[in-house]
Amino acid sequence: MSKRTVFTTVTALPAGITRQSVLEALHDHLAMIDLNPLVEQRHSVNPPADATPEEYHCRWYQMTDKVRYLPIGLYSGRVTYNACFHNLADGLQTHVYAPFGLSIKGRWTVGGSVPGEPIKAVELGLGMPISGLWLREDVDMKCSILTTKFVRKTLTKAHARLVDRLVVKAQLADMRAYNAQIWRQRLYLPLNLPTSPELQLPIFSRELTNNATVSPVSDLDKTNKKHLNSAPPIPRKSEFRPSIEKHQPSPFQNCPSSNSCNVNHVFELEA
């Protein structure tokens, strides 16, 4: 005969922790499994054939827990089971299918307010803090009436240690994010270099500007033409006087041979 047990556990989160870091820790399925002190082995598996249409699209894992049935470790055993994980905007939803008809539905929720946010009304009877962040775990468990007390005690003790480890994990994540932000500010901070002096143009007095005259374009054209007319004329090609008379006969023209010829010719060159 199975019995249904529903209970809620609320843990106040320390000041300075951010909502984003806690959500990131909850959405890291493998980290959540490793934070559980009961889990010894875990690996991803495909959805079982009898999974519901909604849970078929979740992430499935197979885990092995080491459970102590008697105190001081007198008798212990290992239990292998499947579980599905589903991320939510404000937390995480899980469903465990263990042997002997044990079914555990869990929902983790991050709530509360941080400084600067409006304080919302909290649910009564759960011991929720009025201000600050809190982590809530809702458990809906079905198991044999003979094992209900033992399963609840084991689950509550293991999840208490899981929450403590999760808080430290979130604090370390916030510390790394803060240090990274400080280093980014140092790297990309603009340097306080001395500014170059502004370029100052000369300022002329009003008298100089009023007395200054600007020649029109027509006057400039006349001045250029005057300079061109006063320049000496360029001589023509026919006016150049050659230095040597053209068509002057060669002194060796009537010489029968170069050995017996006496050169008595005189070249007349013009000075």
Image: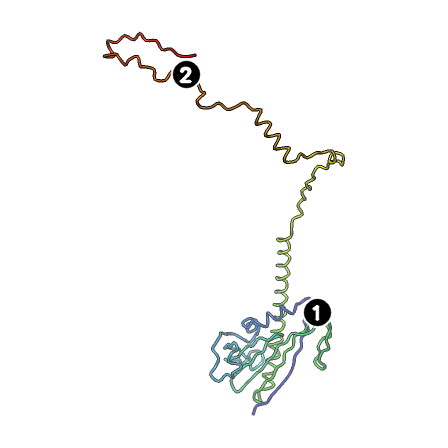
Q: Quadrant of the C terminus?
A: top left
The x and y percentages for residue 265 are 32, 9
Residue 104 on image: x %, y %: 57, 83
21 in relation to 263, above or below: below
In the structure shown, which secondary structural element does the residue marked by tag 2 occupy? loop
Q: Residue furthest bottom?
A: 1
Q: What is the quadrant of residue 261 in the picture?
A: top left
Q: Name the residue under label 1.
A: 114
Kind of residue at badge 2:
Ser
Q: Position of residue 44 (x, y in %)?
A: 49, 74
Vertical order, 107 against 265 (above or below)? below
Relative to 146, say whether 115 is above or below.
Answer: above
Q: Which of marks 2 and 1 is nearer the N terminus?
A: 1
Q: Which of 13 and 41 is in front in this view?
A: 13
User: In percent of the image, x 31 and y 14: which residue is there?
Assistant: 250
Q: Is residue 161 visible?
A: no
Percent coordinates x, y for residue 95 in the rendering: 56, 81
Residue at image x 73%, y 36%? 209
Residues at marks 2 and 1, CA–CA distance in whole angstroms: 109 Å
Is disc 1 placed on a helix, strand or loop?
loop
Binning the other alpha carbons within 10 Å of mark 2 as few (below 14), some (14 to 19) or many (20 upward) gives few
Q: Are marks 2 and 1 in contact (CB under 8 Å)?
A: no
Residue at the image point whose x is 36% and y is 11% from the top: 267
Q: At label 1, which amino acid type do we have?
A: Val
Which color scheme did the rendering employ for the protein?
rainbow
Q: Which of 218 and 108 is in front in this view?
A: 218
- The mark found on residue 243 in the picture is 2
| Foreground residue among 86 and 206 | 206
The answer to whether residue 70 shows anywhere in this view is yes
Q: Is residue 115 above or below residue 267?
A: below
- Disc number lying in front (2 or 1): 2
